[in-house]
Amino acid sequence: MIKVTILAIHNTLATTVMGPMDVFFQSGQLWNFINGIPLTPYFDVEIVSYDGKPVKCLNNAFIQPHRAIDAVTETDLILIPSINDIEKTIRYGKSSLQWLIDHYHRGASIASVCTGAFFLAETGLLDGKTATTHWGFVDQFQQMYPQVNLKPDRIITDEGDLYCAGALGAGIDLSVYLVEKHVGHEVAVQISKALIHDMGRNSQVPYTVFQFQKNHTDETIKASQEWIEENYTREIDFDDVSKNLGISRRTLERRFKKATGVN
């Protein structure tokens, strides 16, 4: 079975730990159980903490890990959940940063959810590579890690053995995505159906475009953003938007990408 290790960190959002765990654990099981066929689990999932002690989440619930990070001798995939008080968490997590680096060089893939991307970036493994994070922390991330090619519009980034996902719910998207990569499309579809989860989301833009992409000087693009913001409940026809602005759709798309950094 594929071994997945989830690192529980103090003041994490509990769902960014338990949500991915449930996706991996139930793959090959929940769908099979519902349909009366033999269970075929694909993932061996465990939770670890720095010292093996319970971790208090941001909602004041506690997660009891299976063991400490030092007891992990091998793993195929490590998942980093969200972190709170980013600089403090990084400062107190220096030993686990080296633990991540060591396991990566021994062949493990690493995935981050939400602000967990900061923790992953701190290892230096994302330098020169693409990443994403929660839309509300884009400016801070870019200031701290300018060497990382941040794609704030993406829900998931994939560098082959390094993965990032946006905010809390995107942790489920990423987990299903990784199920598909490891054991195939059919199993990913099955777990999505069993959990009533929509596969295929690939952009944070519908949720975040106006929060982090107006810090530019293109007034035409600002006007387009404001119009969309005011009419977000309608079906958006970008041909109409470009026509109202007096430019072609192709020009609108080109200038939008240049002004906002969204691909």
Image: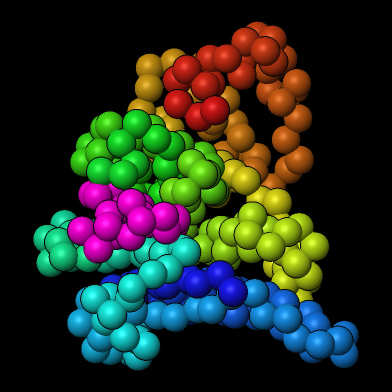
Image x and y of residue 29, in percent = 72, 83
Indicate yes or no whether the magenta region holds residue 120: yes
In this rendering, position of residue 36 left or right of residue 87: right
In this rendering, position of residue 69 left or right of residue 89: right
In the image, which residues are magenta? 98-123
Query: In the rendered image of this protein, does residue 50 appear above or below residue 107?
Result: below
Query: In the rendered image of this protein, does residue 183 appear above or below residue 248?
Result: below
Quadrant into which the N terminus falls: bottom right
Question: Which residue is at 27% across, 57% downward?
Answer: 102
Indicate yes or no whether the magenta region holds residue 179: no
- Report the label total: 0
- Indicate the colouring scheme: rainbow
Looking at the picture, tell me which residue is in the foreground, 260 or 25. Answer: 25
Question: Which residue is at 80% across, 62% downward?
Answer: 186
Image x and y of residue 128, in percent = 34, 31
> Is residue 216 visible from the viewing direction of this image?
yes
Question: Which residue is at 54% across, 28% downward?
Answer: 263
Question: Which residue is at 64% across, 55% downward?
Answer: 181
Query: In the rendered image of this protein, does residue 174 appear above or below residue 73?
Result: above
Looking at the picture, tell me which residue is in the foreground, 250 or 50. Answer: 50
In this rendering, position of residue 219 left or right of residue 225: left
Image x and y of residue 6, in percent = 41, 72
In which quarter of the view is residue 64 placed?
bottom left
> Is residue 166 visible from the viewing direction of this image?
no
Looking at the picture, tell me which residue is in the foreground, 28 or 141. Answer: 28
Image x and y of residue 42, in percent = 64, 74
